[in-house]
Amino acid sequence: MLTPDVLAGPAPEVAPLLLGAVLRHGEVAVELTEVEAYAGRDDPASHAFRGPTPRNDVMFGPPGHLYLYFSYGMHWAANVVCGPDGTASGCLMRAGRVVDGLELARERRLGAPDRDLARGPGRLTQALGLGPEQRGADLFAGGLVRLEPHSGPPVEVASGPRVGVSRAADVPWRFWVAGSRYVSAYKRSPRAEPHPTAER
């Protein structure tokens, strides 16, 4: 059962627990198939590595809130804040499968194939209609944006290096549902360098 107390654990332990959970915004709901963990100020790939800023201040708050950021000047990406209050850890929701509100998600994604409606961080937020207005939303307050626990059988979890990061690129903190068609393609950053924590 996902609760703020469960999300207060370390990001690499929380991230696989999110697989199969459902992120809902109004009519549309997405079952999460892929996530990445970011360990705050202990993680050079994290937005919080250099401390709090107006952009990342939500990450430094309590677990169970939504951290949104604008990526590459193109799309929004959504993270579940985790770890104890003040640690600024988070889990990027990389991909999922639309399980409710399919027609609205298709409209938002301009005719993309169903497999690709939420397969990728920007696609996921677009399908859900998430943007700056939802930044900081409490996912357990019963509002329009909420995180619902996985209700099916346990999922088989696979893991590997994170996508597109140039620092700590080999840390195996990307988690996905093994065998799922709704997982994004792995792309290593051309600027990526090995990092000592890759052997954790």
Image (cartoon, grey):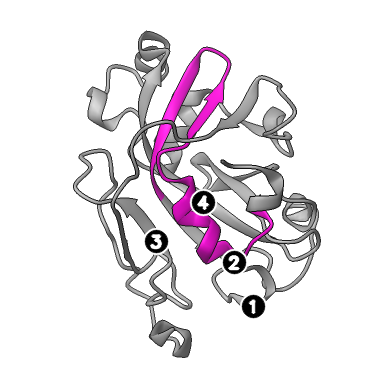
2 vs 1, front mark: 1
121 vs 125: above or below: below
Type of amino acid at the residue the image marks with label 4 = Leu
Sequence order check, earlier mark of 1 and 4: 1
Q: Which residue is mark 2?
A: 46
Q: Which residue is mark 4?
A: 92
Few, some or many C-alpha atoms within 10 Å of disc 3 (few <14, some 14-19, many ≥20)?
many
* Residue drawn 39% across the image and 65% down it: 162
Q: Is residue 132 magenta?
A: no
For marks 2 and 3, give the CA distance: 13 Å
Q: Nearer the viewer, residue 1 or 8?
A: 1
Give the secondary structure at mark 3.
strand
Whether label 1 touches label 4, CB < 8 Å: no
Q: Which residue is mark 3?
A: 174
Sequence order check, earlier mark of 3 and 4: 4
Answer with left or right where residue 55 lies relative to residue 200: right
**Magenta part of the protein: which range?**
7-34
Type of amino acid at the residue the image marks with label 1 = Asp
Spot occupied by residue 45 in the image (x, y as percentages of width and height)? 54, 70
Q: Is residue 30 magenta?
A: yes
Query: Residue extending furthest top?
Result: 103
